[in-house]
Image (spheres, helix red, strand yellow):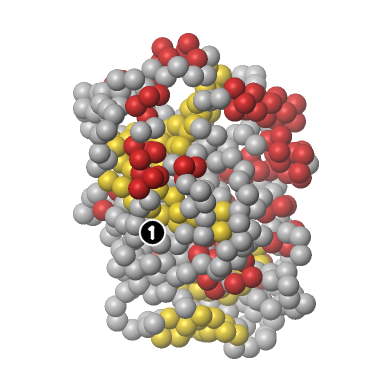
Amino acid sequence: MSANISVPLGPPASLPVPNPTKSFWLHSEPTANPLAKEGSRGPITSEADICIIGSGITGVSTAFHLSEIIRSGDGAPGHDGGPLKVLVLEARDFCINGGHLTPVSFFGFMTNEQKYGTHEAISNAALEEHTFNGIRRLCRDNKWGKDIDFIESGRTIMFLTEDDHQNAWIDFNRAVAAGLPGLTGENRRVEWLRKEEVKKRYGANYPAVRTPGSNLWPLKLVTKLYQKAATNAPKDMLVRLHTSTPVTAMAPISTSSSGSGPRWRLRTPRGDISCNYVVHATNGYASYLLPHMAGPKGIVPTRGQVVALRANAPAAEITSSGWTSNSGFEYWFPRPPKNLKDPPLIILGGGREVTGDFEFHQTDDSTVNPAVGRAIRGFLPPLFPGKYKEGREPEGEWTGILGYTKIGDPFVGPVIDPASSRLNKYEGQFIAAGYHGHGMPRAYACAEAVAQMIIADMRQESWTRPAWLPQHYLTTSRPR
């Protein structure tokens, strides 16, 4: 995650633009996105029990966790008259995702401990371990590893300044003192590297630290999760997907609190959909349908930019590790090579720090920022002399919309408008969004929590917060 930055006021988000830039993940392989246009034609599903808005890692993980909870329980709770209908709605093509699947480890521990206490700081790391372990287990149990390019290559954090190095060391020692697992002893999973060691191993003349982590093809993972949720769902649950179906407005159609609904009408260009529960899995776009979430106290849409850049050295000389540097602003990893003699393709993102506004309040991912492009093109050659060529044009360049928050952590739980005196104004609506540029290690677990909340509400039971979910993530714990 990048360094803390003051987020300015701004308007609510727009809908996603219809013509985004072409990312490597969606367009480099003709068969990479078999669900791209799923459900985009023909009659729309006009009634559902649960509507999930957004088909990224959060939305699809929510559908997946719902199916797993129902499968392991007593069937669809409190539901009569056919299977429980779960509908995933996407404004554009299926799944626009990116990112490393790398737990935060001890980074940021001191800040979290000072703000929220030791238990919360430990939970913050535990949630990301929960995500990492859950996806790794799915890959192992379902033999998805090769299909989604899942590689446990670790992550190397390189310190370009002494301040970054010292702050990381302070975080590490605070986490050790608090008993965060994996930092010391026989189960130690952290390796500190002097700049001489980094130079010898990787060719960069800066100190670093290595932590556990992985990279993968996010779109392929989300495709697998949706297919598993849809094809292996219990007989009393039905999962459907409508792409090219933006939700443009919402309106209540009842005030029922019995869980029998429908409570909400969602408007789309293809027709209206009535449902009882709504899940906002829209991340940076959340304030379009939830205007009270605009501005720095909510979720700020932020444009991120990425290039696919060919290295200037064979893959055998380029570590397979994921990397981050420059206070978290730049992050990169090589694609798995077919031949160790060939130069690998590097996926490299960042560069927002060279702009005056850090690309905050940007929802147009149909274009790239030339200044950001120049910054990320020129980032690696000076760090790794000879391994990256100055002036080499990337083989792909694209943007995507992130969701930033004031505290750097997501909103998870029931939708609450702090300005409203009605606690039930959005009854039946839930959100998991605002990952602050760090979604892959958090979204899967946050979606699991939301799925648990919905099932508990259907069963008219109390929901118990898992030990791995930080209390301060919850919408019910945010200052009103």
The residue closer to the viewer here, 228 or 175, is 175
Q: Is residue 147 above or below residue 261?
A: above
The residue at which mark 1 appears reads as: 365
Identified at 39% across, 38% down, the residue is 375
The residue closer to the viewer here, 55 or 110, is 110
On the picture, is 300 further left or further right than 233?
right
Identified at 47% across, 46% down, the residue is 355
Q: Is residue 33 above or below residue 461?
A: above
Q: Residue 217, position in %: x, y?
A: 36, 45
Identified at 37% across, 83% down, the residue is 270
Q: Quadrant of residue 106?
A: top right
Question: Badge 1: how crowded within 10 Å, few (<14), some, or many (20+)?
Answer: many
Identified at 26% across, 23% down, the residue is 313
**Can the viewer see residue 186?**
yes
Q: Residue 309, position in %: x, y?
A: 29, 37
- Which quadrant is home to the C terminus? bottom right
Q: Is residue 45 above or below residue 438?
A: below
**Can the viewer see residue 101?**
no
On the picture, is 114 further left or further right than 466?
right
Q: Residue 186, position in %: x, y?
A: 61, 19
Q: Amino acid at mark 1?
A: Asp
On the picture, is 15 further left or further right than 311?
right
